[in-house]
């Protein structure tokens, strides 16, 4: 365009110069006629020269503007890598340069936004809580991996939340947060079978709401276990305490107590005091085993020697009860154990067999070798245990027959202690029983060759809570 203007200026100046020279050489009508004719021819020639140049300039400008339009279209479609090829120093080149810089900045901004979005998605997916965001019209905007795992394919972006989640408490919290503009809290147990969630729903600045579901199933189970434990301990202590109090009050109120009656009462008091002492000792033992600081003093021991030592140590108890304690054989394989803890395991199991399998008149104690471990067993031939109780007999204070257990002097903690000690040794414990044929308690210990490194240092107990 600048070249075209320069050409017109040059043509005007040339014609003015020609007219002046012609006027100087001639005058009158002849001179004017000659000047007019030359002016016309000069204009025609200038026009013929200017038109192609103007067309070329216009075509070049149109092509560059078309490129700018195509560039704008690609940017509008999301292609932020598009760039204009520019050259020269005219105004269009300056515009192309500015547009390229704008596109580059847009690309950087969108890259940062996308990076932030991915980081946010990763953070939300790594959360233990389930998260779902809802738009102002009730559509699911996004949800994290935990929420998708809970709801499966039911929940997805663009679908109404009410069609994805049927839980009324969650829907009420989300709706309340949207309408009130405040955080709403709730609690539900119908989102997933056997699981309990605490809900918090907060409004979003642009409308809609975000809901966070915190799984409190384990917390609730632990709290229920604590409540049950306190209730059981209180019940177990209250019975002997009530008995002791009653007999003591009777002795105190009697003006001249009979010596025979006094002796009988004192024996009952002693029996209940002994029961309370055993319960206290078992509670302390269980608390110690469940403590994170509980450590085992591991030593190598042969399985056959462990079984024989258990029989020798408890032989007196069995003889007094009239039961035959039989050695059922055991391999000489070596295991790593804490001797005191294993004595407690065998003592609890054999004492349990004496109490509840006395009618069978016989107890077998032995061990057998498995692939990588030794399985020990204590078998009685008493009335046995019904199948519905087998999976729960290792729970604290669980009794198959509560009246019979209290009569036998049991605390309800012996098998729980056995379970935790065996688990601390890296083993497993279970029971097998059939009504009328007796019960067998079995536990495993790893063979020492499989845990050579554990033989040189105490092992921290890994106890199931």
Image (cartoon, rainbow, N blue to C red):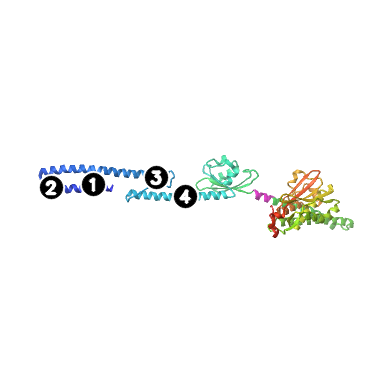
Residue 222: in magenta span:
yes
Q: Which residues are magenta?
A: 217-224
* Residue 452 in view (yes/no): yes
Q: State if disc 3 and disc 2 touch (CB < 8 Å).
A: no
Query: To which quarter of the image does residue 389 belong?
Result: top right
Please tell me whether residue 170 is drawn above or below residue 271 in the rendered image: above
Mark 3 and 4 residues: CB-CB less than 8 Å, in contact?
A: no
User: For mark 1, what is the residue?
Assistant: 8
From the viewer's side, name the closer residue of 442 and 271: 442
Residue at mark 3 to residue at mark 1: CA–CA distance: 35 Å
Q: Please give the name of the residue rendered at 70% of the width and 50% of the height, measured from the top-left corner.
A: 225
Label disc, if present, on residue 23 of the rendered structure = 2
Residue drawn at x 10%, y 44% as measured from the top left: 28
Residue 214 x/y as whole percent? 60, 49
Evaluate if marks 1 and 2 touch, with contact meaning CB atoms under 8 Å apart. no
Assign the magenta stretch its main secondary structure.
helix
Is the C-beta separation of discs 4 and 2 under 8 Å? Answer: no
Q: Residue furthest top?
A: 163
Alpha carbon distance from label 1 to label 4: 51 Å
- Neighbourhood count class around disc 3 (C-alpha, 10 Å): few under 14, some 14–19, many 20 upward: some
Q: Secondary structure at mark 3?
A: helix
Which residue carries the number 3 mark?
72
User: Residue 448, labelled with which disc?
Assistant: none
Mark 1, other Cα within 10 Å: few <14 / some 14–19 / many ≥20: some
> What SS does tag 2 mark?
helix
Give the CA separation, mark 1 to mark 2. Answer: 23 Å
């Amino acid at each position: 365009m600048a070249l075209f203007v320069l050409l017109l200026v040059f043509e005007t100046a040339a014609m003015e110069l020609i007219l002046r020279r012609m006027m100087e050489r001639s005058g009158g009508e002849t001179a004017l006629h000659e000047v007019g004719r030359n002016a016309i021819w000069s204009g025609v020639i200038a026009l013929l020269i200017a038109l192609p140049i103007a067309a070329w300039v216009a075509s070049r400008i149109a092509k560059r503007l078309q490129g700018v339009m195509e560039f704008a279209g690609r940017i509008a479609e999301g292609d932020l890598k598009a760039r204009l090829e520019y050259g020269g120093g005219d105004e269009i080149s300056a515009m192309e340069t500015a547009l390229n810089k704008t596109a580059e900045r847009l690309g950087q901004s969108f890259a940062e936004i996308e990076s932030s979005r991915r980081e946010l998605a990763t953070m939300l997916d790594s959360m233990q809580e389930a998260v779902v965001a809802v738009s102002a019209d009730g559509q699911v905007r996004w949800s994290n991996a935990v929420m998708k795992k809970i709801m499966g394919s039911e929940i997805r972006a663009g679908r109404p939340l009410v069609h994805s989640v049927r839980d009324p408490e969650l829907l009420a919290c989300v709706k309340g947060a949207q309408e009130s503009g405040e955080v709403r809290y709730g609690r539900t147990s119908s989102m997933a079978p056997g699981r309990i969630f605490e809900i918090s729903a907060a409004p979003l600045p642009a409308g809609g709401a975000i809901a966070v579901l915190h799984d409190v199933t384990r917390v609730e189970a632990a709290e229920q276990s604590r409540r049950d434990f306190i209730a059981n301990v209180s019940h177990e202590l209250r019975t002997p305490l009530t008995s002791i109090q009653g007999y003591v009050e009777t002795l105190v109120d009697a003006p001249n107590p009979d010596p025979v009656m006094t002796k009988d009462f004192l024996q009952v008091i002693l029996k209940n005091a002994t029961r309370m002492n055993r319960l206290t000792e078992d509670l302390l033992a269980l608390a110690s085993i469940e403590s994170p600081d509980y450590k085992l003093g591991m030593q190598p021991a042969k399985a056959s020697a462990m079984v024989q030592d258990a029989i020798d140590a408890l032989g007196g108890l069995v003889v007094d009860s009239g039961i035959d304690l039989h050695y059922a054989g055991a391999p000489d394989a070596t295991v790593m154990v804490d001797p005191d803890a294993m004595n407690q395991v065998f003592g609890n199991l054999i004492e349990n067999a004496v109490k509840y399998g006395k009618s069978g008149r016989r107890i077998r104690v032995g061990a057998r070798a498995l692939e990588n471990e030794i399985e020990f067993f204590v078998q009685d031939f008493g009335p046995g245990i019904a199948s519905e109780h087998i999976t729960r007999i290792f729970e604290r204070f669980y009794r198959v027959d509560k009246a019979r257990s209290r009569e036998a002097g049991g605390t309800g903690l012996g098998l729980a202690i056995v379970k935790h000690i065996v688990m601390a040794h890296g083993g497993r414990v279970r029971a097998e029983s059939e009504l009328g044929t007796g019960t067998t308690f079995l536990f495993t210990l790893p063979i020492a060759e499989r845990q050579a490194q554990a033989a040189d240092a105490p092992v921290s107990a890994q106890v199931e809570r």
